[in-house]
Image: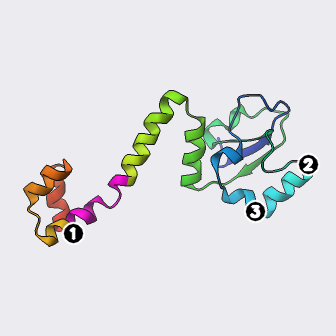
Amino acid sequence: MTDDAYLFLLDDASARLGVTPAAVGELACMETPAVRAWLDAQGATATSPHLRLLPPEETAAVPEDAERLPVPLSDEELSRVRHHLAPESLAGVEEELLAYRDCADGRDGLIGRALAAGVPPHRIVELTGVDPATVTAAAQG
């Protein structure tokens, strides 16, 4: 297994393998000289329906005869690739988890600000649904 994702070209654009980079959104690797040169050498564009991307744990699925290029992805980019590859039944739940992560980000800071503003700990527990120990931990900083 590799730590890099792989860009690769499929002969059959209708094959359901990988995800097109264009579907994932902006990827920093697509603007690198290495990827640009590889695409030029293949006579392909970044928006080609034949161009696909697979995360590191799935690169064994790249066909042996496919033109391929390892590319590094950030954690956020890799998360988007995996999300696009997830079955539809899981994609909705993944969306909810991402929304939760976004809402919970900065939770301890918010609890600390609430305590500093004078909101009683029991009221923070009541409003947020967090465990009282979480409020205590946030108060201790």
Region of the chain picked out in magenta, as a range: 103-112
| Residue 30 falls inside the magenta stretch | no
Left or right for 115, reference 105: left
Provide the secondary structure element on which disc 3 rests.
Answer: loop
Q: Which residue is under mark 1?
A: 113
Which is more N-terminal, label 1 or label 3?
3
Q: Three-letter amino acid code at disc 3?
A: Thr
Q: Quadrant of residue 2?
A: top right
The front one of 33 and 89 is 89
Mark toward the viewer: 3 or 1: 1
**Few, some or many C-alpha atoms within 10 Å of disc 3 (few <14, some 14-19, many ≥20)?**
few
Residue 106 is situated, as x and y percent measured from the top left of the image, at 32, 61
Q: Which residue is under mark 3?
A: 32
Provide the secondary structure element on which disc 1 rests.
Answer: helix
Q: Which residue is under mark 2?
A: 43
| Residue 104 falls inside the magenta stretch | yes
**Few, some or many C-alpha atoms within 10 Å of disc 2 (few <14, some 14-19, many ≥20)?**
few
